[in-house]
């Protein structure tokens, strides 16, 4: 896993159009997955997006049968998929954040994500909190904090799916200065009370609100080996409100133009600041353990 140091400062274009691309990758269709991602990125760029987010495991699909199938599908960081995304980022002057099944130099598979800009691969992250079958299919959990990368548009942090449900992990990216947090996800479709917004989206809204930062989540859709997917891609503003419509259960691209500079202001009233008001010394559990 790598994260390059910040590049020399350039004038920031804080108002930027962000796209979340809801596609339907499938296990065993690597070429098709690569095509789906390319078509979505090009369509998003054609709509004016300069930051494009793709789902979790966009290169492979998700529902593996075993570790052998996973290892056969995973790719190194210098493989065809990353090279394609680097070409797209350079051609369209994009920042691309996407989930990726990484074959590490150690021979292990990681549920990873990458951030790529017009200069190439900037940072890689390995999912720290594995979900359900990921623990039996052979994924190795990551052990490094989520990267926060200086880009031409602002500071972008990223992590993968279940990571977003751990407030402590999201707070790490916020305290590192993330103005936009990108989340490639694969959200399984679960029953919910009639009329209720999916719980996954509610939690994303909370992530944004309690940290006063923008969050852009790209979910997948379709059915894969009997698993239905939510298709809950959404972009949320720094107050915690969605700024894109939901396209549950179908392929779609949602875009929003955001002024990322707004996320630098953590004040929520004349006398309150969601970061300055923190009291970490009070958050330790008995025995000195952190909560």
Image (tube, grey):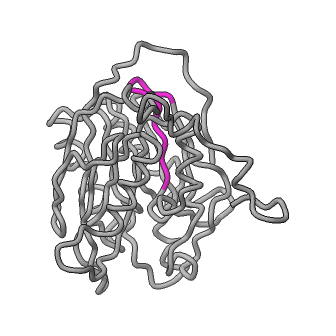
The part of the image, by quadrant, that contains residue 213 is top left
The residue located at (24%, 66%) in the rendering is: 231
Q: In the displayed structure, would residue 25 be above or below residue 147?
A: below
Could one spot residue 177 in this view of the protein?
yes
Q: Is residue 281 magenta?
A: no
Task: Determine if residue 119 is in view.
Answer: no
Residue 93, given in percent of the width and then of the height, sits at 31, 28
Which residue is the extreme one toward the front?
A: 271
The picture places residue 150, in percent across and down from the top left corner, at: 50, 28
In depth, the one of 234 and 21 nearer the eye is 234
Residue occupying image coordinates x 48% and y 52% = 113
Image height of 195 relative to 276, above or below: below
x, y percentage for residue 216? 34, 47
Q: Main secondary structure of the magenta part?
A: strand
- Count the marks: 0
**In the rendered image, which quarter is residue 249 located in?**
bottom left
Q: Residue at x 38, y 56 (%)?
A: 204
Identify the residue shown where x is 49% and y is 41%. 157
Check the image and name the residue furthest to the right: 287
Task: Please state the extent of the stretch shown in magenta in the rendering.
Answer: 150-159
Residue 219, picture quadrant: bottom left
Q: Nearer the viewer, residue 286 or 204?
A: 286
Viewed as shown, does residue 121 lie left or right of 46? right
Residue 36, position in %: x, y?
Answer: 24, 57
Is 239 on the left or on the right of 247, as rendered?
A: right
Q: Does the magenta portion include 151?
A: yes
Which is nearer the eye, 102 or 166? 166
- Quadrant for the C terminus in the image: bottom right
């Amino acid at each position: 896993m790598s994260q390059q140091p910040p590049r020399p400062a350039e004038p920031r274009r804080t108002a930027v159009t962000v796209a979340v691309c809801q596609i339907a990758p499938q296990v065993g269709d690597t070429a098709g997955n690569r095509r789906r991602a390319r078509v979505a990125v090009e369509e998003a760029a054609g709509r004016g997006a300069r930051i494009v987010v793709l789902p979790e495991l966009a290169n492979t699909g998700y529902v593996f049968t075993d570790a052998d199938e996973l290892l056969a599908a995973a790719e190194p960081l210098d493989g065809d998929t990353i090279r394609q995304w680097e070409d797209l980022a350079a051609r369209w002057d994009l920042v691309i954040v996407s989930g990726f099944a990484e074959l590490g130099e150690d021979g292990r598979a990681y549920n990873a994500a990458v951030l790529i800009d017009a200069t190439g691969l900037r940072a890689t992250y390995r999912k720290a909190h594995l979900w359900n079958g990921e623990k039996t299919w052979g994924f190795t959990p990551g052990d490094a904090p989520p990267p926060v990368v200086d880009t031409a548009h602002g500071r972008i942090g990223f992590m993968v799916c279940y990571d977003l449900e751990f407030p402590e992990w999201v707070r790490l990216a916020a305290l590192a200065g993330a103005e936009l947090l990108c989340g490639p996800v694969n959200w399984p479709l679960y029953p919910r009370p009639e009329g209720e917004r999916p719980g996954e989206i509610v939690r994303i809204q909370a992530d944004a609100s309690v940290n006063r930062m923008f969050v852009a989540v790209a979910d997948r859709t379709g059915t894969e080996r009997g698993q239905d997917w939510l298709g809950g891609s959404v972009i949320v503003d720094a107050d915690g409100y969605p700024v894109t419509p939901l396209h549950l259960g179908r392929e779609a691209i949602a875009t929003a133009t955001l002024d990322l500079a707004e996320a630098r202001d953590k004040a929520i009233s004349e006398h309150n600041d969601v970061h300055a008001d923190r009291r970490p010394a009070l958050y330790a559990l008995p025995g000195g353990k952190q909560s």
